[in-house]
Amino acid sequence: MTAPLVEMRDMVKSFGGIKAVDHVTIDLNPGEVVGVLGHNGAGKSVLMKMLSGALERDEGEIWINGEKATINNPRDARNYQIETIYQYLALADNLDAASNLFLGRELVSPLGFVDDAKMEAETRKIMGRLNPNFRRFHTPVAGLSGGQRQSVAIARAVYFNAKILIMDEPTAALGVQETRMVAELIEQLKSEGIGILLIDHDIHQVKLLCDRANVMKNGQLVGTVKVDEVSEDDMLGMIIAGKCPPQGIPGPGALS
Amino acid sequence: MTDTTSGESAPTKSRNLIAALELDTRLLGMIGAFIVICLIFNVLTDGRFMTPRNIFNLTIQTASVAIMATGMVFVIVTRHIDLSVGALLATCSAIMAMMQTVVTPDWLGLGLNHPATAPIAIVVGILAGLIIGAFQGWMVGYLTIPAFIVTLGGYLVWRNVAWHLTKGQTIGPLDENFQLFGGINGTLGETWSWVFAAGAILASFYALWQSRRAKVAHEFPVKPVWAELALGAIIAAVIVGFVAILNAYEIPERRLERIFEARGEVMPEGLVMGYGIPISVLLLIVIAIVMTVVARRTRLGRYIFATGGNPEAAVLAGINTRMLTVKVFAMMGVLCAISAIVASSRQTFHSNDIGTLDELRVIAAAVIGGTALSGGMGTIYGAILGALIMQSLQSGMAMVGVDAPYQNIVVGMVLVLAVYIDIVYRRRTGDKT
């Protein structure tokens, strides 16, 4: 069996005396969508932030394609082609779509000056694929709708050829139409062999989009299940009671 | 096309011309306000306000505050503040004054007015500004002490370090070459001023052409050619007008005689010479261009604005916002040192009170120029126009005979009013940033 795309082994992160993430191990394969579920404060976002480099881990190892990876900051994560779409859209409101898409990775001319025309052209290309109705290339993103802003964030991940995509409640701020657009996009990215970690509250959404789901409670892993082997009630039981169904693989946080 | 979300909506008829030229309405508003102020004072002073002599004086009085205001834009855009700029100017000025009156003539034994004196003093002064600014930025960025506190402390420290360095004395006269940066003592003269104007016009047309070419290369919509040419013509007219006015301010005959005497020549009968562009103003123009390029065409500038717009997004995008803070304050420090050169050489000596209250003038200039204290927004040209508007108000009122305390009352009210107008403007145009 080939090595998984991502393995996070025994990850630990504490804030003060509180263990936000307590010895959690999860993995992700290419072309797979894996959910990370749990209540607010269960530690899902902290776990993902250790992978995206936004937080430094206290303990644990990250393996990518069977090799041990060093991820200490967002730049490291980007070098492993890990892209993140954050819950609270990490866009600079005062900049336009192109400046946001290329933020931190600006295209520059041979003299080292940022090449706005080229970045806009590239942005127009990628947005033409993802959101063909988008025209507002010269507006600061503060003036865009939630869906438009989300498509800029997703375009950023797609443009830079993400192999591993972390989506932190990508549809939380979106309407029905826009949610469907994001769901279609996830299917498309999946078919291109990208591995996606999806943090979500919505069990229905997870059943629909994910292949497997990890459930966390109080910083610990309750268990990992294949979503089509369990019912929504089973998953609810995992989230609320910490009870891992017999079909799943229980983690250290499972009720014994 | 069935595009309803277009941001490039059709302009209303009254704004067609402005839209075609793609001009910044906020900039137009500020220029309009400035012109109105000039016209009012011109009437009140029976035409004395808009004479070449007064305009010349206005430009050299504005230079010092305007130079610092360009740096303050970056500081405020990154959601910080710098209250120490006037005090830092004083320390840099004291260091440079001591360099040229004690260190180089006595310690290095070069004597007075040696050609190396001014460059040595300037390099040391700018280094001092860089180090002090970077140090304050390090405290803000890495020690996470609020900028307000760091620079409030800096305000007390550097003002009195300056006093300590000079033992509270006025230091002067400064080196003759150094004094060239002071305005009236150092100007380009008519010929070089015209050379500068020609160069500036060529550069503007080149920049317009380059920007158009880049758009065409990517098949973006471009302005009609007539609009492009009209814009170029306006820029050229402004440059020519500006230089013509500064050239029209004639060097007094006696002073001209002394210049020829010093060279051991006889002044030709009936010779008339204009001052031209002051070197301090040239310095301001160069700094304005450099800072604008930094803001718009470099990664550093992009990161400054991104950090101001959303600091968390900037960090997540891999930007080292701590180091960025150090850089921004270091730039501010260098600009304080450059302003110190201009300010001290203008008065031909270093005094204890040099730069007093400049921090407030500089912040006010940036804010009047449209820099938002909430961060993420501001322009270099706006800050310079802001400085010019404040200086015009102050000079104009002085010429009309308004007492200094009343001048300050008016300037204070204008500051608040300008920010209010800006808020209303943004609400109207739906500009949420």
Image (spheres, grey):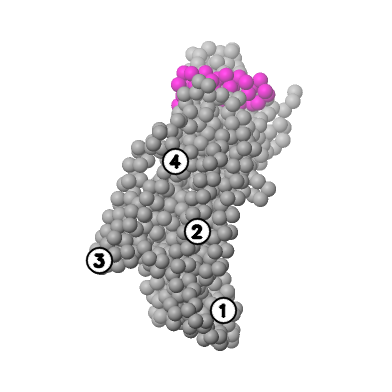
Q: Earlier in the sequence, mark 4 or mark 2?
A: 4
Q: Judging from the image, what secondary structure is the residue with disc 1 in?
A: helix
On screen, residue A117 above or below A112: above
Q: Is residue B69 above or below residue B340?
A: above
**Labels 4 and 2 touching (C-beta < 8 A):** no
Are marks 3 and 2 in one subunit? yes
Q: Secondary structure at mark 2?
A: helix
Please provide the residue range marked out in magenta: A173-202
Residue type indicated by callout 2: Val
**Cα distance between the residues tagged 1 and 4:** 50 Å
Residue positioned 37% across, 40% down in the render: B426
**Residue B18: which disc?**
4
Question: The residue under label 1 is which amino acid type?
Answer: Thr
Residue behind mark 2:
B240
User: Can see residue B52?
Assistant: yes
Spot occupied by residue A35 in the image (x, y as percentages of width and height):
56, 23
Looking at the rendered structure, whether the residues under marks 4 and 2 are on a common chain is answered as: yes
**Contact (CB < 8 A) between labels 1 and 4?**
no
Residues tagged by mark 3 and mark 1 found on one chain of the structure: yes
Q: Is residue B98 left or right of residue B394?
A: right
- Residue A201 belongs to the span the image colors magenta: yes
Query: 10 Å neighbourhood of mark 2: few (<14), some, or many (≥20)?
Result: some
* Amino acid type assigned to the residue bearing label 4 in the image: Ile
Tell which subunit mark 3 falls on: B
Q: Nearer the viewer, mark 3 or mark 1?
A: 3
Q: Position of residue A146 (x, y in %)?
A: 46, 28
Is the same chain shared between marks 2 and 1?
yes
Which-is-in-front pick, marks 4 and 2?
Answer: 2
Mark before the other along the chain sequence, 3 or 4: 4
Residue hosting label 3: B402
Q: Which residue is mark 1?
A: B117
Q: Residue at x 63, y 32 (%)?
A: A159
